[in-house]
Image (cartoon, rainbow, N blue to C red):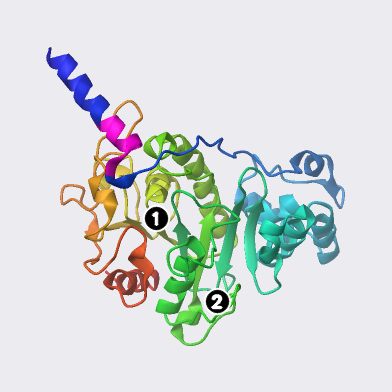
Amino acid sequence: MRRFGRTMVTAALAVALVGGTAGWASGDSQAAVTGPPPGTAAWRADTASGRPLPDPATAAPREVAAFFAGLDDAARRELLRSHPLVVGNLEGAPLPLRYEANRIAVVATGEARYASLAAPDRRILAFDPRGRGQVAEVFGDLEHAEHVSVIVPGSDNDAATYDAPRKPHTGPAGMARALREATGAGAGTGAGAGAGAGTGTGGSTAVVAWIGYTTPVGVGLDAADGRLARAGAARLARFTAGLDAVGAPDPVLFCHSYGSVVCGLAARHTDAADLVAFGSPGMRADTAAALHTGARVWAARGPSDWIADVPNVEFAGIGHGADPTSAAFGARRVPAADVQGHTGYFMPGTQSLAAFAAIAKGETR
């Protein structure tokens, strides 16, 4: 009888997770985009100055960086012209080369939904048109930044929607611009705003909006289990290794909602300086120590964030575990008393944004 009771409780929690807690809506199951980028087969068959090219699936980003360092400009540009989708997504490749390669790749799709990404003032660090599309965009001067932050978003984000005009501070690109402006860089206006180095001390801060994994759609079973998060964690770990390979400083990971599940699973495999979970349903760990990371772990949740109504359970793959804002979890708390809703953490003037900016600039101890 006791076993039956436990089963019924767990089933009820699972139903609450995927079926209607706090206004949750059902979502369509997504196929995770994994593996090397399109065009990899042709890349593997090619050479540069008689040398085999590094395998996008197996070569470490530092090996990729060393390979490109050994090429002259003509050889680099030939690879850029012949294999833009591979070069643009190859962790460890020179940043300017990747920006140019992705501009070419975006145009080559001929799809109107991606057209704005090809604007000359945008720095697209990764672009994969498969599925709903994945993208990473840099705001600031990543090559010379003293501090780097990465926004890791949750559900309903992809290459076509992450910079929606209706989300100036709540979408991934809007969060990145808001954070960069809060550090003192000044975000400016327009589609590619914030792409330049900026002025003042904030000019040394670069922020990346990283939609480098297949996110859940809606808040159904995909958002309640860890399948997409596990695939995303592997890609996030490789992305941060790529930043390290090109000499970028250890990043701060700002992880929102389901993105915090991705960060929790990736934590031990990154060199992040800080890991900030906000609006989190859990990080697939019972405590901050269980993340096995050298990063400082922070957590924030606003008083009206509906994520508070999601049961903090994990059973048979459903649910994401402990509440990162609980005292027992052991994360440092970020003030968020004035945050509205689930996505308001980067709204100008909020306590959370001010705290995030201090973390991004390395001003906290």
Which residue is at 60% across, 72% downward?
191
Q: CA distance from mark 2 to mark 1?
A: 21 Å
Q: Which residues are magenta?
A: 13-21
Figure check: 126 above or below 213: below
* Label disc, if present, on residue 194 of the rendered structure: 2
Which residue is at 18% across, 15% downward?
4
Residue 286 is drawn in which quadrant?
top left
Mark 2: few, some, or many residues within 10 Å (few <14, many ≥20)? many
Is residue 320 highlighted in magenta? no
Question: Residue 322 placed where, x, y %?
Answer: 24, 42
Figure check: 101 above or below 194: above
Task: Return the disc, 2 or 1, that comes first in the chain's sequence.
Answer: 2
Q: Quadrant of the C terminus?
A: bottom left
Task: Look at label 1 and name its amino acid.
Answer: Cys
Label 1, on which residue? 255
Question: Residue 181 placed where, x, y %?
Answer: 45, 78
